[in-house]
Image: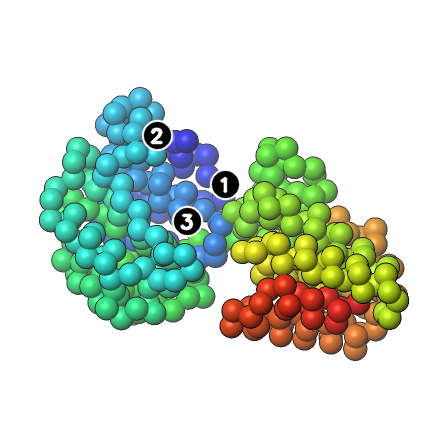
Amino acid sequence: MLITFSSIIGQEKAKQFLLSAFHGKRTGHAYLFRGPAGVGKKTCALAFAALVNCREPNNGEICRVCPSCIKYQSGNHPDLLEILPQGTSAIKIDQIRELKKTLTYPPFEARFRVVLIRDIHLTMRRKEATNSLLKTLEEPPADTIFILTGDEAGDILPTILSRCQIISFFPLPYEAVAEALTHDKIDRTEAMALSAIAEGSLGRARLLAAEELLPLRREIVEKLIALAPGRPETVETVFQLAERAAEAKDNLEELLDLLTIWIRDIMLSRQGLAARTINHDLRDILPAAASRWSDEELNERLSLITRARRQLLHNCNRALVCEVLFFGLV
């Protein structure tokens, strides 16, 4: 799919900055797109890469039919290099060394080679890779544009920051996220809940929808409300819920986030602030939840979720962590 600036939701300041640089022939050699995950940093980077290499751009829009545009559309442009962290870790020194070898040669066919380096804040953990990248940014090839993306809250070395033009990205308006989700054939009520839970991150909202975490969250909270401690059927149900949660695997932390937000909503409801709750699609069961637990019990449950997070970070057995957690949540 070919991405254009006009198709990107929000981020008007970022888009205008890049378009002004393009129209004024002031394209920089290195940019840092900084902001939360899922709000359009990668999308803007790909749109900019396509634009600077389009043969016949028109008023900030690509032509879509030149050889460069066609290759960007196929996702197979030889002069677009994307460097990703391996798993949840940082970019490794070998990846930077391989990049530096490539940069000794001119672009294959485009005016600019565009290098997209994702999640640069993670790379700060590896001193050797960071220093090697820094040297490349200090002496960049004239025909190369670097676009780094990073978390707003992540630590990035001042020496990296000083060599990049920094462009800030922000959470999208909830209504804009919900509107995009309805175009994905998602129910309006669920779309509003997803946009609020994802805090303006369209990427995260789509992940939650794709992994069907909201139905699992509803199943869990409905059963937690109905269960009575100590009964035989409660024990069996808790084991079933723990098994379902553990099966979320890489999305287990997201599920814990959803449960944390749900408990926050119960607390708001108990204070007469139900209108400020985030889980729009669960407001029908909010009164039952608010009468089920006291404020002290809700705080205890938040502590249990926090402890489960720490255990998962230390690679504890997922199934066991979930079992202990859900027995505590009842």
Camera-side residue: 266 or 236?
A: 236
Q: How is the image coloured?
A: rainbow
Query: Which residue position holds label 1?
Result: 9
- Looking at numbered disc 3 in the image, what kind of residue is underneath it? Lys
Query: Which residue is painted at 44% across and 57% down in the image?
Result: 35
Which mark identifies residue 75? none
Query: Which residue is painted at 49% across and 44% down in the image?
Result: 10
N-terminal label among 1 and 2: 1
Say left or right for 40 vs 114: right
- Looking at numbered disc 2 in the image, what kind of residue is underneath it? Ser
Camera-side residue: 269 or 117?
A: 117
Displayed quadrant of residue 111 = top left
In the rendered image, which quarter contains the N terminus?
top left
Other-residue count near label 1 (Cα within 10 Å), few / some / many at <14 / 14–19 / ≥20: some
N-terminal label among 2 and 3: 3
Q: Secondary structure at mark 2?
A: helix
Camera-side residue: 263 or 26?
A: 263
- Looking at numbered disc 1 in the image, what kind of residue is underneath it? Ile
Vertical order, 161 against 145 (above or below): below
In the rendered image, which quarter contains the C terminus?
bottom right
Residue 47, horizontal then vertical, whole percent: 36, 38
Residue 245, horizontal then vertical, whole percent: 66, 57
Residue 254, horizontal then vertical, whole percent: 59, 57
Displayed quadrant of residue 212 = top right
Q: Secondary structure at mark 1?
A: loop
Query: Which residue position holds label 2?
Result: 74
Residue 131, horizontal then vertical, whole percent: 22, 67
Which mark identifies residue 41? 3
